[in-house]
Image (cartoon, coloured by chain):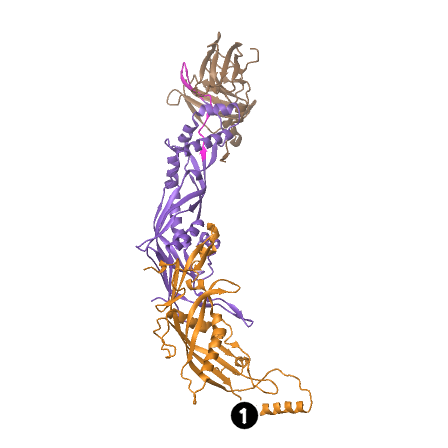
Chain colours: A orange, B purple, C brown
Amino acid sequence: MAFTDHSDLFAAVHEHGINTTIGHLMRQRPSLFNYATLIFTQALSSQFCVPIAPPPGGGPLFTVEPQLPVPGAPQPLGLDWCLQLSNVSIDLYPGNTLTLPPELDPIGSQQFALHLQACFGLACPNDRVVENLAAEMEAVVAARVLGVAVPTADVQPVPSANVLCSCLDVFGVGHFETGAVAGAPGKFLKTRLDNLEIVDLVTNPPSNLESMLECYLRVVLRLGVLPRLIVPMQSLVLNITKMLQDNDTSIGQHVTLVPATDVPNNPAVEDDELKVFFNLKVD
Amino acid sequence: MADLTIAVSEAVCAKTLEVVVANFGFDVSDQADFGAFRVGYDGRLVLKGGSLELRDDGTIRLRELDARWDKLDFSLAVKLPEISFGGGLVEVPLGSILVPGTGVFTGGKTVTFTVHLAPFVKHELSLVGSPLIQHFKPGVTPIGKHCQDLHAALDIDDTKQQWRVFCDPQTIDFDLFDFADTVGDLFEEAFTGALDAALPRGLLHDLILAGIGSIADLLRTLLDIPDDISEWLSDLFNVSLGVFNLILQFVADFFGTCISFFQLDDPYPMFPKTVEKGVELPDVTVPLEHLTATVSDVELVVTADIGAAS
Amino acid sequence: MNELRSDVAINRALLTNPALDSGAIAVRGTVFHVFGEAGDHDVTILRDGRVAGQFTVAVQPEGAVPQVNVDLAGLAADADRSGNVTAHYAVREGGVMGFAVGLGVGRYAVVISHTAGGRSRTVLDSRGQLPAGDLFAVTLITPGTYRATNLTTQARLPITVAMPGRGEPYSPARPTLVRAGDHGFDPAAAHILAGQSIVLLADTPARFLVEPAPSGL
């Protein structure tokens, strides 16, 4: 049986290759996996939960996010924090390298399993800092009671020299799709997260804490991380027909690659590989 | 198992061949002096058509490509023999006296003409090749000027490191030059025209041509050839001028070292550069290693590994 | 369109048709002198009346060639450059030297002196008569009628020059011999093809002039 029995072009990436690629992605674009407030570029730069190596080609270490608000503070106050995703790996169907929690096991046909570690760090102020800020807050309240105008202030960071970290093991199950992206030509490979499970976050009495955190991480992945990982389909064949497509006018034709439809799944996740199938379209 | 497997069907290879063939152009020119005459030629050989077949023995066969000359101009400079009027042997009482003739030419007597031979010769090219992988490094891997120009025309980037897959010819079949019979007439017509133009109009012209006799025979005498001018010309191109061998060498270089069927950037930009929150993020690239290419009777399969992150 | 080029240079003297005089040798004319005696002979070349060169011919009883042809225009050009004609010629006793003009518009004469026993005797001054036994050859190119006149006897020879017919075998190198004596020319008329030569043999001293026949003749 030939690879191209049902299409003109075939490409397969083994899960080992995908994981190596993820390694390159994490190394070269750490800002995709690390989120923190601005203070982490300066005073808290050595306080990450997981150290970040500077990317070889230059670029930011993390994506800057706004601070956590202190609800109710008479003047806006913000707490510094960081969220880091690390140890990312996937296991393609039939799923034989990752041990999934029972809630997710086994993965279904055409699915992949995902594992990552999510670390959350909170820059927790010490008592003295809090006391000083409390005095400021009381002064603002008193002024307002006395009818003295108090100008609106920007969010004031709550200084802290100490980041408290907590890390969780996270497992997920997902699948791949191809589709168009508004405003962009061609088809894209999109990664879809179907389910997510945090391992063993137990409270006494039992509560929804695990579910809430799972929900939060699911939303972060689905809306924050995965949309930035869409890949033009032709990248999966390493643009091997670039010369042909770039020079089709020399043969008086227009040549494009289109996803094949004569296969049960495209892309297909099977045999520990992500497979894609293309046909040559000649006009 | 390789990290990456890419399979390309025979149809895609054949379509790629069409583009490669459309960009094949061999410019060749030279001159040679054979004493009594000098020749020069200036031509451009192009390819059309042909078919591609992937074979079970791991080879690629390109069949029946039409090799045609877009232009094949052949110049012949012939030294006219001494032509004179009058003279000859006369018998007188004391014996024979040789009366000297009056020479027609006082100086140069070279007549040059150019014939356009392109319509009168055609060839067929077939070759059997094996996949050959090259790891191209700009500034290190040698590349000739002619190839650079071809690459520029095909948008193959010689400033980037790439893996390149060639169809390296193992055997080349190319038809010898075999000019059509009508070439003889063409030469005679051209030589006559050249003589007509070189000689002054009028009486001298007519007398000289009457004295020369058959223009065709004169030409053959000057070139020292037997009857068939087409055969003489074919031998000239095949052997004396070495054009046949030049073509073979060019074809071997064109397919084997110059124009690869496929090129893979290394490292490959898996995620292109972008701008996020006003910050420019460079390409995310992955190095490709251990590239192999194998051929079966239905497809060409390229495998590679993705090198580890350092 | 085929391209044509040439560096063919035509002998321009062939494009005109002046009279040919044995007393003033020009292109298409050749004087032949027969050396009757052995010994050194001094040859002086005159071009348009002036000395243009000199050389010696050694006439030998045996062992030398029977004929030498020289180009007076070529020798004069060599002499112009170096001041002397450097060639040395030897011819057999009874042999012939032909004096022709290859190109140009100059008119030439030769004076040959035989030096023997300290004395010099002129054996040929082509400005006058050719001695008996000498010859004058002319090549006629333009078709038409000509006449050759022996200026010594005033005898005339009509000459007809015709274009070779299409398909007719034609060779320019087929000269026709006519003898000139006291009783006129023999044969009495000559017919040649354009581009061929007439050779006039002086049975008696003669000076020859060959010219297009005036109309009406």
Q: Position of residue B269 (x, y in %)?
A: 46, 65
- B250 up-or-down from C15: above or below: below
- B102 up-or-down from A1: above or below: above
Magenta stretch contains residue B83: yes
Q: Position of residue C63 (x, y in %)?
A: 37, 23
Q: How many marks?
A: 1
Does the rendering let one see residue C97?
A: yes
Does the rendering let one see residue B141?
A: no
Amino acid beneath label 1? Asp
Residue placed at 46% from the left, 31% from the top? B189
Q: Nearer the viewer, residue C66 or A163?
A: A163
Question: Where is residue A2, by image quadrant?
Answer: bottom left
Q: Looking at this rendering, what residue extends furthest in the left direction?
A: B57
Q: Nearer the viewer, residue B90 or B181?
A: B181
Residue placed at 55% from the left, 18% from the top? C19
The chain letter for the residue carrying disc 1 is A
Q: Nearer the viewer, residue A209 or A239?
A: A209
Query: Is C136 on the left or on the right of B173, as rendered?
Result: right
Q: Nearer the viewer, residue A11 or B102?
A: A11
Q: Position of residue B262 (x, y in %)?
A: 41, 57
**Residue identified by numbered label 1:** A127
- B309 up-or-down from C51: above or below: below
Q: Which residues are magenta?
A: B77-99
Q: Secondary structure at mark 1?
A: helix
| Disc 1 crowd, CA 10 A, few/some/many (<14, 14-19, 20+) | few
Q: Position of residue C58 (x, y in %)?
A: 43, 23
